[in-house]
Image (tube, rainbow, N blue to C red):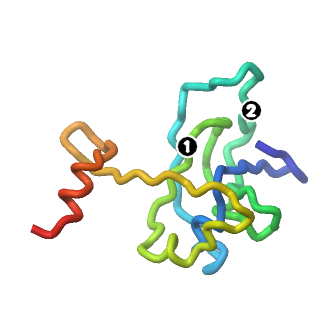
Amino acid sequence: MKHSHGEEFAVVRGGTHHLRTPATKGHDQPCSVLEMDAWPHPWPRPAGSGDRVTLTGQLCTPKDVLARHVHAPGLRAGDRVVFALAGAYAWNISPHDFLMHPRPGSTSWTLGAEGWGPLTEDERERKLTPQ
């Protein structure tokens, strides 16, 4: 979490080098915050103090903005941000290895009887394999 000129920023792991669409199209990527309880560090957990935050990536450019003024009250370091509607080409048009940052993980989710949950690799293969 960073504060500058009266605005709060959350620097996420990754950025427009993984999800190029917001910078290319000039829009704010739809997203949701998943609160995570675990905080494995001995120092205090940074948290936002307002209701709105601008989500930026870790690149050294002012253009590495994923979404501006996102409603995310109480966003804390270690919470997860899930970007929706990324589209089929968002990953393909992104310069993944720019500045040699690590590539993000990817999880497929499905809506089941008990709500949303991640697919196992076997379930993912069955859904993606033509019958």
Q: Position of residue 92 (x, y in %)?
A: 50, 75
| Amino acid type of the residue that numbered disc 1 sits on in the rendered structure | Arg
- Where, quadrant-wise, is the N terminus in this rendering? top right
Q: Position of residue 56 (x, y in %)?
A: 71, 57
Residue 20: which numbered mark, if any?
none
Mark closer to the chain start, 2 or 1:
2
* Residue under the image location 65 percent in, 66 percent down: 97
Pick the residue in front: 56 or 99.
Answer: 99
- Is residue 51 shown above or below 127? above
User: For the image shown, how many numbered marks are present on the structure?
Assistant: 2
- Mark 2 closeness class: few <14, some 14–19, many ≥20 residues within 10 Å: few
Tell me the residue that label 1 is attached to. Answer: 80
* Residue 65 falls in image quadrant: bottom right
- Is residue 18 shown above or below 42? below
- Where, quadrant-wise, is the C terminus in this rendering? bottom left
Pick the residue in front: 109 or 7.
Answer: 109
| Amino acid type of the residue that numbered disc 2 sits on in the rendered structure | Pro
- Mark 1 closeness class: few <14, some 14–19, many ≥20 residues within 10 Å: some
Pick the residue in front: 27 or 41.
Answer: 41
| 58 on left or right of 87 | right
* Residue under the image location 54 percent in, 45 percent down: 33
Considering the numbered disc 2 on the image, is that residue within a helix, a strand or a loop? loop
Q: Position of residue 112 (x, y in %)?
A: 22, 45
Q: Position of residue 109 (x, y in %)?
A: 34, 51
Considering the numbered disc 1 on the image, is that residue within a helix, a strand or a loop? strand
* Residue under the image location 76 percent in, 70 percent down: 63
* Residue under the image location 63 percent in, 79 percent down: 24
| 119 on left or right of 106 | left
Q: CA distance from mark 2 to mark 1?
A: 14 Å
Tell me the residue that label 2 is attached to. Answer: 46
* Residue 66 falls in image quadrant: bottom right
- Is residue 106 shown above or below 25? above
